[in-house]
Structure formats: C-alpha cells, structure tokens
Image: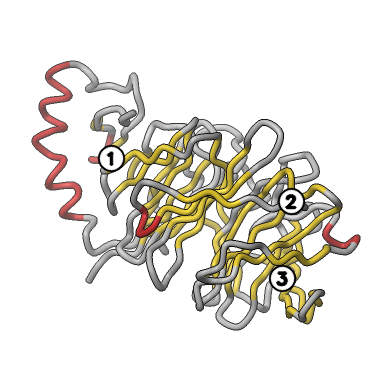
C-alpha cells in the first residue's frame, strides 16, 4: 500500500491526498521533482502525525503548520528514536521515515493491528492485535519481521500499549475483568493487575519519566501508577480540561501523546489539537490547527523528532 502522490496547493503547501489538483501525469512529475526538496526542508523540523481513522495528517511541531497527509487509514500511531512513524492500517503496519510520503516498510501483523509502541532501548515494536476468539500482542524485534506473538489467558480483548524506560511492556484489556498487564523485558509471560472501577473505560498507556500512566478519555484524567507484586495504585492524577473524546465504547482506543512534560490530544474545537503542560493539566496552553476541514475524531498522535 502506498500513499497518493504530492499535489501543490496555494501558498506552496503540499498535500498527499488522492484526487487533489495536480494528480495528473504532469502533476505527478512535478511532485516527483520536488519530493526530495520537500523532505530535505523537513529534515530539521519535528513533525506531529495525527490519525483520524480515515487519514493521517502531518503538522510541524510545535507551530502546528499543516504540511500534508499520508492518505491512508490509521487510528493509533507510534514513533521511534530515528523519527520513523508506524501506522497500523488494515491488516498491516506501515512504516514511514521522517517526512516521507511513502512507506519504507510494510509489516504483516497476522491479524488486525490496534495500537503500537516502540521500546526506547531496543527499537522493538509492540503491536496489540484483534483476533477471532482472543487477542494477542506481536513484538517485532528492532521493528523487523518475523514477529513473536504473546497471549494472556486473562485478556481476550487487548487495548493499547506502552513501554517504560527499562523495556517493560504494558498493555490494557479485558477478559476476566479489566486488567493492566505487564510483559517484563525478556519474559514471555504477562503479569496481570486488576483495574478498579475508576478505570471502567481506559485508553492510552505512556511513560512520563517516573511512572506508567493510564488515561481515561471519557473523564479526562491521566493516572500515575505504582506497581506492587499483585496490585497497582494510582499515586497521582492529572485533569485535562477541554480534551474531546467522541469515541464511545468500553475501550476507547484513543491514543494521545505524552512526552517531555507535554500532553497533546484533540481539543474541544473541531479538527484541532490541544497542548497541555504535564503534570499540571488544566486548560490547554496552546491550540494547533485546524488541520482538516469539518469535524473529525483524533484517535492517535505521534511525534517524529528530526535527527539533528
């Protein structure tokens, strides 16, 4: 699968959407001539990738200038230390180099990929997957095939996932109750922690530098967790005001960005992103966008750092 070619819009803006002006043979030739120039210009620019289900938009960060879109379906996203972005789409995971319009690699997950995370120590890519009868987590060593699948007897439906700074993987899901499960580094067996009533709906998992955090998009809280042998405890919470979540259901699958003391998620305004200070929370300090016309739902956000 590959994204549509670039097309030129007003004021020199580039778009990768199919069917736009310039998608003729002449337009494609012009786009090919300028693709290397465009990617060169963005080498030193951090990029924010925003998934809405039907498309993945690309914005400069922190200014929020829209520079294009990938033209592929995608919900949850993740990025590695090199700035490569992974997009679970359909039955595969597409990998895009920083600023590239075309995938550099297509990974076959085997089932329907849901969420993903990259181990900051090794570059291993974890992907939660939906399957008939039971879900699984596929781990691609250094983001390469083949993958190894892991199942948890207490979780039939996996949600999202995230790594801590030591390479331990955490996933949420449900089966015999709601659980947060840990797959310790170099282990093949999950360690399960039951989730209390405050996590009746749960979403993204992220490392904030000290704690694993678990979000509840329906209430707008991020919880900082501490783990004991057989239990976990919320040792802090951040309220995000103005965080919009339109995804209904027990597992919202709303993946956000928590990195370097900043939280990024959909703002209460249509097709915009709020930028909050973390752990302060409260109201957004900045609003980026709009990045698309009309009303959309943001299901995934990833930051691709430019190599400097």
Between the residue at mark 2 and the residue at mark 3, the CA separation in whole angstroms equals 39 Å
Q: Of label 3 and label 1, which has the lower sequence position?
A: 1
Q: Is residue 150 left or right of residue 39?
A: right
Disc ID at residue 42: none
Identify the mark at residue 153; answer none if there is no mark.
2
Tell me what residue is drawn at x 35 percent, y 46 percent.
95
Q: Residue at x 16, y 32 (%)?
A: 31
Query: CA gap, disc 2 to disc 1?
Result: 39 Å
Q: Residues within 10 Å of mark 3 (few under 14, many from 20)?
A: some
Tell me: residue 96, above or below residue 280: above
The answer to whether marks 3 and 1 mark residues whose Cβ atoms lie closer than 8 Å is: no
Dividing the picture into quarters, in which one does residue 279 lie? bottom right
Element type at marker 1? Answer: loop
Q: Residue beneath label 1, please?
A: 101
Q: As drawn, which residue projects farthest toward the front?
A: 188
**Residue 63 in the figure: left or right of residue 282:** left
Q: Residue furthest right?
A: 197
Query: Residue shown at 35%/59% (left/top)?
Result: 142
Q: What SS does tag 2 mark?
A: loop
Between marks 2 and 1 in the image, the one whose residue lies nearer the viewer: 2
**Residue toward you, 104 or 184:** 184
In terms of depth relative to the viewer, which is nearer, 224 or 41?
224
Q: For residue 48, say whether it is visible.
A: yes
Residue 258 shows in the view: no
In terms of depth relative to the viewer, which is nearer, 189 or 275? 189
Residue 261 in which image quadrant: bottom right
Q: Which mark is residue 282?
A: 3
* Percent x, y of residue 216: 76, 58
Pick whichever of labels 2 and 1 is earlier in the sequence: 1
């Amino acid at each position: 699968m590959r994204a549509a070619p670039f097309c030129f819009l007003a004021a020199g803006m580039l778009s990768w959407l199919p069917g736009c002006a310039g998608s003729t043979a002449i337009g494609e030739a012009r786009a090919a001539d300028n693709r290397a120039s465009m990617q060169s210009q963005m080498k030193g620019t951090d990029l924010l990738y925003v998934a809405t289900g039907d498309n993945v938009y690309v914005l400069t960060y922190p200014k929020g200038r829209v520079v294009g879109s990938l033209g592929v379906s995608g919900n949850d996203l993740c990025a590695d230390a090199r700035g490569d972005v992974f997009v679970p789409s359909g039955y595969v995971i597409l990998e895009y180099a920083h600023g590239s319009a075309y995938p550099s690699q297509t990974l076959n997950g085997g089932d329907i990929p849901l969420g993903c995370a990259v181990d900051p120590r090794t570059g291993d890519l974890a992907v939660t997957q939906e399957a008939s009868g039971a879900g699984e987590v596929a781990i691609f060593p250094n983001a390469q095939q083949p993958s190894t699948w892991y199942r948890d007897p207490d979780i039939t439906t996996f949600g999202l996932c995230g790594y801590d700074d030591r390479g331990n993987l955490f996933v949420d899901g449900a089966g015999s109750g709601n659980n947060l499960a840990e797959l310790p580094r170099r282990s093949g067996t999950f360690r399960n922690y039951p989730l209390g009533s405050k996590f009746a709906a749960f979403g993204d998992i992220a490392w904030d530098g000290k704690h694993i955090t678990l979000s509840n998009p329906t209430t707008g809280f991020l919880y900082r967790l501490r783990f004991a042998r057989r239990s976990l405890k919320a040792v802090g919470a951040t309220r995000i005001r103005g965080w919009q979540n339109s995804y209904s259901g027990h597992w919202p699958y709303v993946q956000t960005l928590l990195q370097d003391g900043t939280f990024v998620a959909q703002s209460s305004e249509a097709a915009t992103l709020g930028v909050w200070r973390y752990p302060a929370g409260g109201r957004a300090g900045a609003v980026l966008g709009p990045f698309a016309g009309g009303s959309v739902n943001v299901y995934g956000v990833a930051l691709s750092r430019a190599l400097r």
